[in-house]
Amino acid sequence: MPRTEAETRMTVFRTPPFGGRNVPVRGPVPGRILPLFVLALLAGAGACSRHESAPARPPDAPRSQDHATPRPADTPPSPPAATAAPATRNADTAPHTGAPAPGAAPETATVTPAAGAEANGTPAEFGAQAALLYRVAACAPGAALPEPYESSKADYCRWLDALVARYHDHYLSEAGPFLAALRPHELPATVVYPFGGGDLLSALTTFPDAREITTLSLELAGDPRRIDHLDAEGVARSLATIRASIGGLLSQNDSTSDNLMKAQRGEIPGQIAFFLVALRLHGFEPVGLRYFRLEDDGSMHYLTAADIAAVEARTARPRHGKWTPPDFSEAFANSEITFHRAGVPDDPPRVHRHFGTNLADDALARRPALLAHLEKKGRIASMTKAASYCLWNPGFSKVRDYLLRSSDFMISDSTGIPPHYARGAGFVQETYGTFSGSFLPASKTYNDEFRALWAAQPHRRLPFRYGYLDAAKAYHLLVTRRDGAGHQG
């Protein structure tokens, strides 16, 4: 049967964490369900979807009834020419703050829907929970936490600290300067990362000066309140689940579906934990956490305590029909984390927003508010990686066309925008590393276009992995920039 957005699986060649020979690994490897540090270490198997199935269907193949009848990919169409406030409807406002200093132990674990939130239209604030999760799940340094948290996280944090050190010493030290040389001097401060899952880490590695980052994927953010009520056994069990999930993925002992359910179900919200690990790795700390929904015009409505209570009993719907439902309320689908430099209270806050959403054309047609929201951002920088070639797929034309309209600069692997569309929209593309063919079965037309693009340009060395390997297990990276927008190199 044809595959839809939530049905991809892949057999990868696992690369030792920071380079070296690629080692074949048999079995499915999910995408950005990997916690962020492991995603960076492996440079990523990710996808526009992360549900277990057979290998991703080629974009030229017919799609299921979940999508409209596509135009064949081998005959491509022409490319297309918050601050907390009493009111909860707003556009993309300045970042809010609301957490205690993350480096300090919380005074108490809050048990109300949101610390300090009243049923008077004030957005519900979960900064205290974010601060606690930052210390427990991301193992950020600071004063000793009250029990049961401090002793229950000790073994987990020793393990995580070692991975953090390796990331800084072996990956970021090389990828950071390399990517900096690619970015233009004049770059939009707003970044959009479709099919990004929990991968705030790669966004901050690629665009460390961004003031606003938006990630979009099928995964939902998760309920942060459960951390307040865990006993010692619950803390240990939750952290063991995170660790076992990572270890299982690295050894190929866990199936894609199993690990996906672990991230969307349980006491610690998987996506939020991944985001907080990314902040720690890049030297940031959270100062606020809110949840929101979109109004029909694309404006944001921050949820109040009353909003959350009204849907408390309604389990979040999966963003695809074959997706295992999360075990938390629909209220916790979309998150906004504000953050600043750790230990620098007067550092202007930045914002990360995550949308749990389906980016297929039919889903966006049913819910046009998302594209209306994205259009309000104006000029953006963008990225994607390990995205199952969704941007090659005629069933994802709306998000591709949005990127072509709004992006000034994009970094991707070969799952980025095919040359046919990029040229027609006034972009130039620069290649790095080597590309001999797509990692997963995909359009012959676009494979030929990318092979021709790489062959026509001088070889530019790429010393680290960025997203997928190619068909021959080689590193590759693609810069797509509006014609006339140079780079520092």
Image: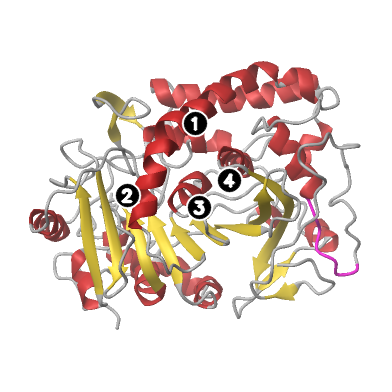
Residue shown at the point (88%, 58%) measured from the top left: 117
Mark 3 vs mark 1, foreground winner is 3
Looking at the image, tell me whether mark 2 or mark 3 is earlier in sequence order.
Answer: 3
Residue shown at the point (88%, 42%) measured from the top left: 111
Which amino acid lies under the numbered mark 4 shown in the image of this protein?
A: Pro
Which residue is disc 2 drawn over? 388
State the residue in front, 123 or 458. Answer: 458
Mark drawn on residue 249 = none
Looking at the image, tell me whether mark 2 or mark 1 is earlier in sequence order.
Answer: 1
Mark 2 and mark 3 residues within 8 Å of each other at the beta carbon: no
| 102 relative position to 262: left or right | right
State the residue in front, 335 or 202. Answer: 202
Q: CA distance from mark 2 to mark 3?
A: 25 Å
Which amino acid lies under the numbered mark 2 shown in the image of this protein?
A: Ser
Looking at the image, tell me whether mark 3 or mark 1 is earlier in sequence order.
Answer: 3
Asked which secondary structure carries label 4, the reply is: loop
| 198 relative position to 329: left or right | left
Mark drawn on residue 208 = 3
Which amino acid lies under the numbered mark 3 shown in the image of this protein?
A: Pro
Figure disc tally: 4
Mark 2 vs mark 3, foreground winner is 3
